[in-house]
Amino acid sequence: MNYNRSLGRDIHIYSAKEPDLVLGGLILASGMTNTNFYAMVEIVFIFTTNFTLRHRSGVVITRDDGPIQPGDYFIVSAGTCATNNEALISSLEAIHPGARDGNFRTSVRDRDRRCVITETPVNERQVECGFRSGINACHIFPIAHNWLWENKNYGRWVKDNIDDESEPSGSINSVRNGILLRSDVHDWFNNYTLSIDPDDGYKIVAFNFDSRFGRSGARLNQAYVQSPDAPSKHLLRLHYRQAVLVNVRGGS
Ligand SMILES: *[C@@H]1O[C@H](CO)[C@@H](O)[C@H](O)[C@H]1NC(C)=O
């Protein structure tokens, strides 16, 4: 799929040392703060010293909860700033994909009972009668990359007790690698156009115009994310980092 993710960006990122070369950018969706923007820049670039972000107007922005303003931003740092060339999981070949598992579907549906992003409930009667509800159990870490799951031991993040060395790592079909999403939301989550930032109160972040779902900036239910079998924050963080890399990194 050759989709140009830089179309429609209202933020462009440059280095102050090379002000003609676009290094990245972003389509603004509601709820994005200056702090979120700094965190994204720290994912996309690797710094050797501290840095600040300066708007073209000359204003240096601070790490606060104010909404990011559209425009051109310059990275200002005394040291070097290199683009993080980390590979995208979606660009890796899917070898040894995991097998789908009916228990995964049932356990995620029983835990969530609604699309966690749009809050659309599963119609239980429809499901009892054997119809598809249009609300699917999705893998946070893609099942197509089970090899990578095993290789990186991401299964340690779905254990009941992450600190218990004697507990074996879990499977890619663990309920903690699952999330219930309406099928259209699922498509956007799978291609990283929509993600969840566990480091900002599980905020929903849209990386494109949010007119479709209107949930960007809202947070997941807080009792839900604190529950012991909740989706793993480590896996959500990995998803969010991938979303930032694929959407923010690079010029047009
Ligand atoms: C993501 O998926 C949605 C739904 O299929 C599609 O409309 C959108 O263009 C996709 N985005 C990218 C960047 O592929």
Image: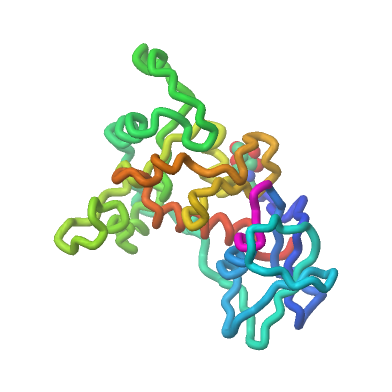
- The picture quadrant where one finds residue 46 is bottom right
Which residue: 63% across, 67% down? 63
Q: Position of residue 247 (x, y in %)?
A: 63, 56
- Residue 240 lies, with reference to residue 105, above or below; the image says below
Residue, far bottom: 78
Residue 46 in view? yes
Residue 72 located left or right of residue 208: right
Q: Is residue 16 magenta?
A: no
Residue 173 in view? no
Residue, far right: 57
* Number of numbered callouts drawn: 0
Which residue: 52% across, 60% down? 241
Q: Position of residue 5 (x, y in %)?
A: 68, 53
Find the magenta span and give its range: 30-36
Which residue: 75% across, 59% down? 11
Q: Position of residue 108 (x, y in %)?
A: 35, 35
Give the colour scheme of this rendering. rainbow
Which residue: 51% across, 27% down? 120
Residue 250 located left or right of residue 142: right
Taking depth in this image into account, of 74 and 177 the one nearest to the observer is 74
Assign the C terminus to one quadrant of the image.
bottom right
Q: Is residue 31 magenta?
A: yes
Taking depth in this image into account, of 130 and 44 the one nearest to the observer is 44
Taking depth in this image into account, of 47 and 170 the one nearest to the observer is 47
Quarter of the picture for ligand 1? top right
